[in-house]
């Protein structure tokens, strides 16, 4: 990052009972540093007194976020950096999901990889019609985390989750709305106005009813089974140790298409 580049931060702005959080890392397309993710975790784990709604967006209108920041890391260290970034991302997504107040994603631009999981963890998503989305994990040779996959399956269903993850293809805002990846699509000019109107609508509802309804929905959805998590963990570890992961990261750094070997018909089976 150039010496004169602004630091990567999570900007906070309070307006009455609404708190705006904006991811800001302009030199890196708003990529998610551990510091930004830890700040999201901190705020969502313990919202400031009196805050009843959080709006999670980003600085500028070109990028919501390019995902976990991999800047300045090469070679074998890149794999560990991605693992560490995944851990920070997971904590932030869990904090958003478990936040005691509603969290609404305000998406004004490109939303890639882990940034899309952060948005998926929110109560709902409002996007500008210029926004685009992509989940390139498999193109890097990565099997995504079970918690993350569960979020997308709950949101999109298994078939559309497969389509999103297995192709890594870009999805425009209209398609994202059609498949349920976002819930509202508006002009970029009124994106934050629309988000603030949504916050105002929540504030008009009874706080206890808002909290109770969110808790009831979460209870109905149910927690992830520990055995499912363990089984997927085995599959993920196999991927991390494999040649595809190394080639995917290498191609990413070299800005080229990865060259895959023929894969087996099925991944290594997890233990019963």
Image (tube, rainbow, N blue to C red):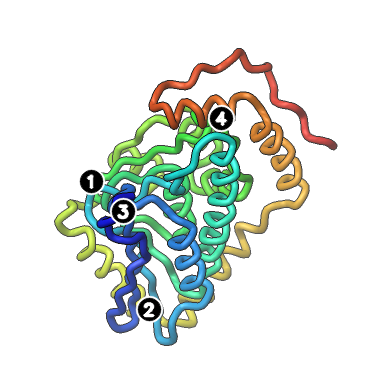
Q: Earlier in the sequence, mark 1 or mark 4?
A: 1
Element carrying mark 4:
loop
Q: Quickly name the residue at label 3.
A: 107
Q: Tell me the number on the disc at residue 205.
A: 2
Left or right? Give the position of 90 relative to 58.
right
x and y, in percent, of residue 196 in the image: 26, 69
Could you tell me how far apart the alpha carbons at marks 1 and 4 are, in whole angstroms? Answer: 30 Å
Q: Nearer the viewer, mark 3 or mark 4?
A: 4
Q: Nearer the viewer, mark 1 or mark 2?
A: 1
Q: Earlier in the sequence, mark 3 or mark 4?
A: 3
Residue at 44%, 44% in the rendered image: 72
Nearest the camera: 111 or 174?
111
Tell me the mark number nearer the camera, choosing from 2 and 3.
3
Say left or right for 267 vs 221: right
Give residue 60's position: percent from left, percent from top. Answer: 23, 55
Label 1 residue SS: loop
Question: Local crowd at mark 1 within 10 Å, few (<14), some, or many (≥20)?
Answer: many
The outermost residue toward the left is 189
x%, y% of residue 140?
51, 31
Return the disc, 2 or 3, that comes first in the chain's sequence: 3
Answer above or below: position of 91 versus 170.
below
Look at mark 1 in the image and give the residue it sits on.
129
N-term mark: 4 or 2: 4
Q: Secondary structure at mark 3?
A: strand
Mark-to-mark CA distance, 1 and 3: 9 Å
User: Which residue is at a point 70% across and 25% down the rendered structure image?
Assistant: 267
Identify the residue position indicated by label 4 in the image.
141
CB of mark 1 within 8 Å of CB of mark 2? no
Name the residue nearer the viewer: 59 or 78. 78
């Amino acid at each position: 990052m150039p010496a004169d580049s602004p630091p990567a931060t999570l900007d906070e702005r309070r307006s009455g009972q609404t708190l705006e959080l904006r991811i800001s890392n302009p030199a890196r397309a708003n990529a998610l540093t551990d510091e930004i993710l830890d700040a999201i975790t901190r705020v969502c784990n313990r919202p400031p007194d009196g805050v009843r709604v959080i709006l999670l967006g980003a600085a500028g209108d070109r990028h919501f976020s390019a995902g976990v920041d991999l800047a300045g890391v090469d070679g074998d260290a890149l794999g560990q950096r991605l693992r560490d970034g995944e851990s920070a991302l997971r904590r932030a997504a869990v904090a958003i999901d478990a936040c005691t107040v509603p969290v609404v994603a305000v998406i004004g631009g490109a939303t890639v990889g882990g940034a899309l999981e952060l948005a998926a963890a929110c109560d709902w998503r409002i996007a500008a019609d210029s926004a685009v989305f992509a989940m390139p994990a498999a193109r890097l040779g990565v099997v995504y985390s079970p918690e993350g996959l569960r979020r997308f399956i709950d949101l999109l269903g298994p078939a559309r989750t497969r389509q999103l993850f297995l192709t890594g293809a870009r999805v425009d805002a209209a398609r994202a709305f059609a498949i349920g990846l976002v819930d509202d699509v508006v002009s970029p000019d009124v994106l934050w106005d629309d988000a603030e109107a949504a916050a105002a609508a929540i504030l008009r509802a009874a706080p206890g009813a808002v909290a109770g309804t969110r808790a009831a929905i979460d209870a109905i959805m149910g927690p992830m089974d520990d055995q499912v998590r363990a089984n997927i963990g085995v599959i993920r570890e196999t991927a991390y140790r494999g040649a595809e992961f190394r080639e995917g990261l290498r191609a990413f750094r070299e800005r080229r298409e990865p060259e895959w070997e023929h894969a087996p018909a099925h991944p290594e089976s997890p233990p019963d």
